[in-house]
Image: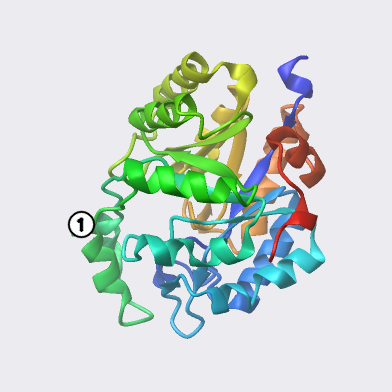
Amino acid sequence: MSNTTRRVIISCAVTGSAHVPSMSEYLPITPAEIKTQALEAAEAGAAILHLHARNPEDGRPTPSPDVFRQFVPAIAQETDAIINISTGGSTRMTLDERLAYARVAKPEMCSLNMGSMNFSLHPLAEKMQSWRFDWEKDYLEGMEDMIFRNTFRDIKNILTEFRDYGTRFEFECYDLGHLYSLAHFIDKGLIKPPFFIQSVFGILGGIGADPENVSVMRSTADRLFGRENYHFSILAAGRHQMPLVTMGAIFGGNVRVGLEDSVYLSKGVKAKSNAEQVRKIRRILEELSYEIATPADAREMLGLKGRANVSL
């Protein structure tokens, strides 16, 4: 089938844990805001909603199942979009904290970082003129001395546990080495196709947001896994978001946007919602003659267990 007729999955990462509220007044932080923006993104064309939780009082990232419960079930009642619960949390959470709600919800999909890494936005702190909450400055600056932990044993244990739930993963690969780590677990029989590889560009500590790197990640994944066994997706941080995800689609991949990855819609213009970013990439994709995957399409492509088999 020609690439110009294939369906492209749009994922939307609604709030994340790296950006702080002072970066954008439009970043959703309360359960009501996260719910509203997630539903708007789904209506705009996002087949997958990648979700984190934040303390509604000050926007600080939280792993609390009680906070997740304030918006995830409500989202599930109003859209058939695939709900993807982060197991990444933040660099300040323990592994058990990061997994707490996913263990309860047993969702169709979770994210899974494929290795430990330096993950930092600390240079952005120097550009901030004011802070909305007192925790934000230390949080951003502190990233300079923080490590995101996912050891081989951590990953093995997550894969083993969540296999029993029937949950599949968005495998987040921040560098070439993460693809080889993924191949290791495939060789061990812990991961079965079709797998969903989310290649991540432009995070300090990971692979850079250079167009050549998209080609390298794609060709390496093809060599390791065989194109018929996986679905490739692209996300890029900040100003690189739209150009690189568009390039990724042209390379035969799917796309991820959202305020977790960039708070901007275009140069110097903040996105007023996640849906604005979804609508923009949808327009670009449709003008390139791609079709937009529905949630039902994405479930079939990714081999998901279906909404009826979760505990949201």
The outermost residue toward the bottom is 57
**Element under disc 1:** helix
Image quadrant occupied by the N terminus: top right
Image quadrant of residue 13? bottom right
**Residue 173 vertical placement versus 277 (above, below):** above
Looking at the image, which is closer to me, 245 or 8?
8
Where residue 93 appears, as percent x and y from the top left, is: 35, 65
Looking at the image, which is closer to me, 34 or 113?
113
Where residue 104 appears, as percent x and y from the top left, is: 59, 66
**Residue 164 vertical placement versus 36 (above, below):** above
Colour mapping: rainbow
At 79% across and 38% down in the image, what residue appears? 297
Image quadrant of residue 7? top right
At 69% across and 38% down in the image, what residue appears? 9
- Residue under numbered circle 1: 144
Taking the image as drawn, is residue 160 in sight? yes
Q: Amino acid at mark 1?
A: Glu
Looking at the image, which is closer to me, 239 or 100?
100
- Give the number of callouts: 1
Taking the image as drawn, is residue 266 in sight? no
